[in-house]
Each structure stands twice: as structure tokens, then as C-alpha cells.
Image: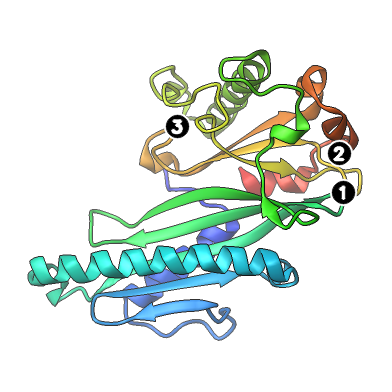
Amino acid sequence: MRAVRFTTPARIICLAGLLACLGLPALADDPKPDASIKNKSVEANIYLDDKIKADAALAADCLAEGKKWIDKNAAEAASDRKQEPELFKDRGGYSFGRNYSVRSIVDGRYVSVLRDDYMDTHGAHPNSDVNTVLWDATETKRISIRPFFGETAENGPTMKTMLKAIITSLNAEKKKRGAGETATAEWYKDLKPTLLKIGAVTLAPSTEAGKSSGLTFHYPPYAVGPYAEGQYVAFVPWETLKPYLSPEGAKIFAGARPKGDQDDQN
């Protein structure tokens, strides 16, 4: 069985969760959580990176979402402990961690944020999740990738081209990992050519300053492969989507994906 592969923020959260589960102290250089809950049923922490903290509106938005998440998990943990006290007797409470980190800043305006989650609810193994936030610093709100394309209709030409390119990228990565046997339509059946079902998206950094080299789509374990394969990142270069770009999209996309980004994300 292959070891699970995590992005760097997820590795930090998993390590912190493991230390908590073992009852060990945090590492000296571990960041202090920006929000937390700790009691007999649960320990849950939210972390914002320094780039997010530098934008007060973005930090407040992420922190509000994160607090709702840990409150929800704390309530569920308390309920589980009440119903199944033996589950917690020798293992302590559940552990949760969420890390918000900036992936790219494009045109000084569009901030792509990775949201990495760690969850240990005393199952067969801890689990992880990944999602994204695309933040418009000028309008101080979350947005989708819709403004960068002339049309994004469900099953329309833009979304179909995007999905085809995602699957090509996933197949290439699976081959590189030696997991080609799961590069099948069955594992991709939940991916749809719609904004809501195509995957969590970020603007990829570029070799050209202030620009984006394309889109990266982030998938947690189980999403497009077995748990043991871990997370996947699919990259769609902007040139593939060039015929469908809006004027704003044509403005922000240029250059190539830095090699260091490829190494870190896959």
C-alpha cells in the first residue's frame, strides 16, 4: 500500500494532530492557533498563515468560517462521547485541525487560499480534506473563477475542455506515482463539467510575476483515487483555456508553472 501524500500545510496539521493524539507537547516552533477548542471530547485548532493575517478582511473571513467548523465538530464530538463513552475512555477526544495558507496572489488582487483539514475521530485512520478559497482583495469577498471566462455554463465548452484537461493531468500524475490502475472513469465519475462539481480550484503561480500560469484543482484522499494514494493536484495550463478567456482572464494569465510549484503540489 502506498503512503498517503499530503501538501505541506496538511503535513503540518497531521503532525500536530499526531502529537495531540499521543499526548506529546507541540514542537517549539509550532505556530500558535488563531482559534481553538480543547476539552474532554475534542481538541480543534485553526491556523492562518502570515500572508492571510496581512489582509484583515480575508483573515476575518477565514477565521469566521474556521470557528464555525470547530464549533460544529466540538458539538458532534460531545454528542458522540455521550452516546459512546467507551470510545473515548482510553483514546482521549477527537482531534481536528484546519490550516488556511496563501497559494498565490495574482495581479495584486486575486488571492488563492488552500484550506487543509485534519480529522481524527477514532476511526481506522485519521483523514484529511482539502478545499480552496478564491478571494478578491479589491471587492473584499470570495469569488469563483467565473469572471475569468466568457462562459462557464454547465456542460458548456469551457467546462468540458477544463474537465478533459483535468483528467489528462490526473492520469499523468497517477502514471508517475505508479497508480495507473486507478486512472479509470469509475474514479472520475463524480467530476462534472460544472463549477460546483469539477473540483476545488486555485490560480497557479507563474514564472511571470503577478500572473497565473493556469488553474490547479485539488482533490483529497478518496476523491479521485483510493485513500492510500493521498491527495492529487491537477494542473490545467492557461493556454488550454485561452479560447474561452474573458478580457479579465486574458489580463491575468501568462507564463509557465514554476517547477518548484509542481514539486510541492504533487
Residue 62 seen in this snapshot:
yes
Mark 2 vs mark 3: give the one in front.
2
- Residue at position x 56%, y 79% in the image: 30
- Residue at position x 50%, y 43% in the image: 231
Mark found first going from the N terminus, 2 or 3:
3
**What kind of residue is marked 2?**
Ile
**What kind of residue is marked 1?**
Asp
Circles 2 and 1: CB atoms closer than 8 Å: yes
Q: What is the C-alpha distance between the residues marked 2 and 3?
A: 29 Å
**Quadrant hosting residue 68:** bottom left
Mark found first going from the N terminus, 2 or 1:
1
- Residue at position x 55%, y 86% in the image: 28
Circles 3 and 1: CB atoms closer than 8 Å: no
For disc 1, the marked residue is 107
- Most foreground residue, 18 or 3: 18
With respect to residue 264, does 11 lie above or below? below
Which numbered disc covers residue 224? 3
With respect to residue 47, does 158 lie above or below? above
- Residue at position x 45%, y 23% in the image: 188
Mark found first going from the N terminus, 3 or 1:
1
Circles 2 and 3: CB atoms closer than 8 Å: no
**Quadrant hosting residue 121:** bottom left
Q: What is the C-alpha distance between the residues marked 2 and 1?
A: 6 Å
With respect to residue 112, does 122 lie above or below? below
Q: Position of residue 158 (x, y in %)?
A: 68, 19
Q: Quick one: SS at disc 3?
A: loop
Left or right for 207, reference 9: right
